[in-house]
């Protein structure tokens, strides 16, 4: 095929995708998370770039054949690794729509449709978490970019306190920005600080124990020592056991010392949806910025995150672009969200968010969150009943932290065996100095049957690993 203009295969290619989708989605409930034997097929993707290709239909047939066999079933109900959600039916169909329409959501003039959907989606997310109507936000690609966006606003605020417009002049001549957190601070927040030029090791960590619980008195003393403004990072939903920093108390310290409070709520922010857990995020409305993921508990496709900002005008101050004659600038009624976040040309990632919230509403999401809370408690009981397993932490949200009874080498080998087996997925971590597993339940498809299956697999692999342990990462 010499030219896409000569390719007659579009309709047939889309038909193939539609047919394959039905079979793939129907298989998610029972298929292994990873068919290890099928991975040899990945070699078929390699080769020399063709001079003349066969056209869309042949290539899509090949891609589907390999992809449906080798793809990690991370959208299925037995993937408990990395805090990864699935994709609701409404979100999946809307994501297909986003690809079909292929909008550049740079601005209102580039796509009035995408701009309006995004405006509504941000307002609905704000309302979902019971934040005041004065808050604004930005849709971004991930929680890392949401942390980046939020901490960019914090940096602009902090520099302004020193009389510097950092968006115009940069960090040159400024002191180091003080950033304080408890021991739950996540690598994505450190990466955001790294990208902003503050350095990933700029965070001062004040932990009261080996697990990482925040040492509030130490944070208060340090804030009192700092001559000038500082930034506090509170963590809503620690990734190993689902624990929370005391957000309201940190908000009090921020208000007392004039600090910026950022809440990293990648998945834990969704505790706000249930009266059983909303106490865990009490005080988030007193924060200056909040970061969260969409492709976790919101159950929309990759890539999706969002930053919510108390003073939304700070987004424009931090991310407004230098002028160009053909681009709408700040204040232009034709401008839009590209001037409120790190990306300029932007896919219409608002469509799956809008569609899923419109389809299931506040009650539907609350029901899903509460079902996952129940499943996490159920898994915790199953762990407690298994003599060869031990739980390491209380089950507060949707993560259950546990390990096989034995040493760290055994548990590393168990984690590697789970990944190599492929029937379920859960990886290892280090919690309180001990190697452990930390399955996270955030997929809308997951049921008690999947939890039973997971525990059965873990117990089988614990027995086989104990008889012939072999260390390895997971």
Image (tube, grey):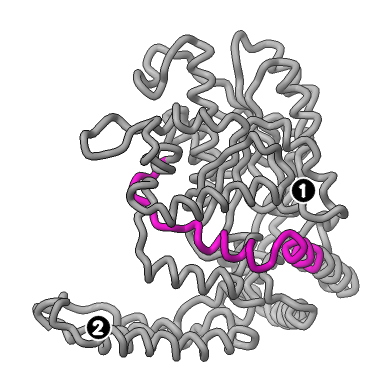
Label number found at residue 232 = none
For image coordinates 69% across by 57% down, the residue present is 435
The relative height of residue 17 versus residue 403 in the rendered view (above or below) is below
Disc 1 secondary structure class? loop
Proximity of marks 1 and 2: CB atoms separated by less than 8 Å: no
Q: CA distance from mark 1 to mark 2?
A: 48 Å
For image coordinates 85% across by 44% down, the residue present is 279
User: In this image, 24 relative to 356: left or right?
Assistant: left
> Whole-percent x and y of residue 65?
38, 89
Q: Quadrant of residue 468?
A: bottom right
Q: Can residue 281 be seen in the rendering of this structure?
A: yes
Q: Nearer the viewer, residue 244 or 317?
A: 317
User: Does the stretch in magenta take in 359?
Assistant: yes
Q: Nearer the viewer, residue 444 or 434?
A: 444
User: Does the stretch in magenta take in 166?
Assistant: no
User: In this image, 468 relative to 92: left or right?
Assistant: right
> Whole-percent x and y of residue 459?
76, 79
Q: Can residue 400 be seen in the rendering of this structure?
A: no
Q: Nearer the viewer, residue 105 or 300?
A: 105
The relative height of residue 157 versus residue 240 in the rendered view (above or below) is above
For image coordinates 69% across by 41% down, the residue present is 235
Q: Quadrant of residue 40?
A: bottom left
Label number found at residue 243 = 1
The crowd level at tag 2 (other Cα within 10 Å; few <14, some 14-19, many 20+) is some
The relative height of residue 408 versus residue 158 in the rendered view (above or below) is below
User: In this image, 291 relative to 105: left or right?
Assistant: right
Which quarter of the image is occupied by the N terminus? bottom left
Q: Quadrant of residue 356?
A: bottom right
Residue position marked by numbered label 2 in the rendering? 56
For image coordinates 64% across by 30% down, the residue present is 288
The magenta-colored residue range is 342-371
Disc 2 secondary structure class? helix
């Amino acid at each position: 095929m010499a030219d896409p203009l000569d390719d007659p295969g579009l309709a047939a290619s889309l038909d193939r995708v539609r047919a394959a989708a039905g079979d793939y989605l129907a298989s998610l409930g029972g298929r292994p998370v990873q068919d290890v034997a099928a991975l040899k097929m990945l070699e078929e993707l390699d080769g020399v770039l063709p001079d003349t290709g066969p056209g869309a239909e042949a290539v899509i047939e090949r891609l589907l054949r390999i992809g449906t066999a080798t793809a990690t079933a991370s959208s299925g109900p037995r993937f408990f690794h990395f805090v990864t959600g699935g994709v609701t039916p409404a979100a999946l169909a809307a994501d297909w729509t986003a690809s079909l329409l292929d909008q550049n959501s740079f601005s209102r003039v580039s796509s009035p449709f995408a701009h309006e959907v995004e405006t509504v989606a941000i307002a609905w997310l704000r309302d979902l978490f019971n934040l005041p109507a004065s808050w604004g936000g930005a849709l971004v690609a991930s929680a890392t970019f949401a942390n980046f966006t939020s901490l960019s606003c914090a940096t602009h605020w902090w520099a302004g306190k020193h009389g510097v417009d950092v968006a115009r002049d940069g960090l040159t001549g400024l002191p180091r920005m003080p950033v304080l957190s408890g021991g739950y601070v996540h690598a994505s927040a450190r990466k955001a600080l790294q990208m902003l030029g503050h350095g990933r090791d700029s965070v001062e960590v004040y932990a009261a124990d080996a697990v990482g619980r925040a040492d509030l008195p130490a944070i208060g003393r340090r804030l009192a020592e700092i001559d000038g403004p500082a930034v506090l990072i509170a963590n809503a939903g620690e990734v190993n056991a689902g624990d929370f920093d005391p957000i309201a108390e940190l908000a009090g310290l921020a208000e007392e010392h004039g600090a910026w409070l950022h809440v990293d709520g990648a998945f834990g922010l969704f505790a706000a949806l249930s009266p059983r857990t909303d106490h865990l995020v009490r005080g988030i409305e007193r924060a200056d910025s909040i970061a969260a993921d969409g492709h976790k508990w919101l159950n929309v496709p990759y890539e999706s995150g969002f930053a919510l900002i108390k003073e939304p005008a700070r987004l424009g101050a931090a991310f407004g672009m230098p002028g160009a004659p053909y681009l709408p600038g700040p204040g232009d009624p034709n401008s839009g969200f590209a001037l409120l976040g790190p990306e300029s040309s932007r896919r219409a990632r608002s469509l799956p968010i809008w569609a899923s919230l419109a389809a299931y509403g506040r009650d539907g999401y609350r029901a899903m969150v509460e079902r996952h809370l129940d499943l996490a408690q159920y898994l915790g009981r199953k762990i407690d009943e298994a003599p060869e397993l031990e739980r390491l932490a209380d089950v507060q949200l949707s993560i259950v932290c546990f390990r096989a009874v034995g040493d760290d080498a055994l548990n590393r080998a168990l984690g590697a065996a789970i990944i190599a087996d492929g029937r379920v997925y859960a990886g290892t971590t280090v919690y309180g100095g001990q190697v452990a597993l930390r399955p996270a339940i955030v997929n809308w498809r997951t049921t008690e049957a999947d939890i039973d299956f997971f525990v059965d697999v873990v117990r089988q692999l614990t027995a086989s690993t104990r008889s012939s342990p072999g260390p390895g990462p997971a």
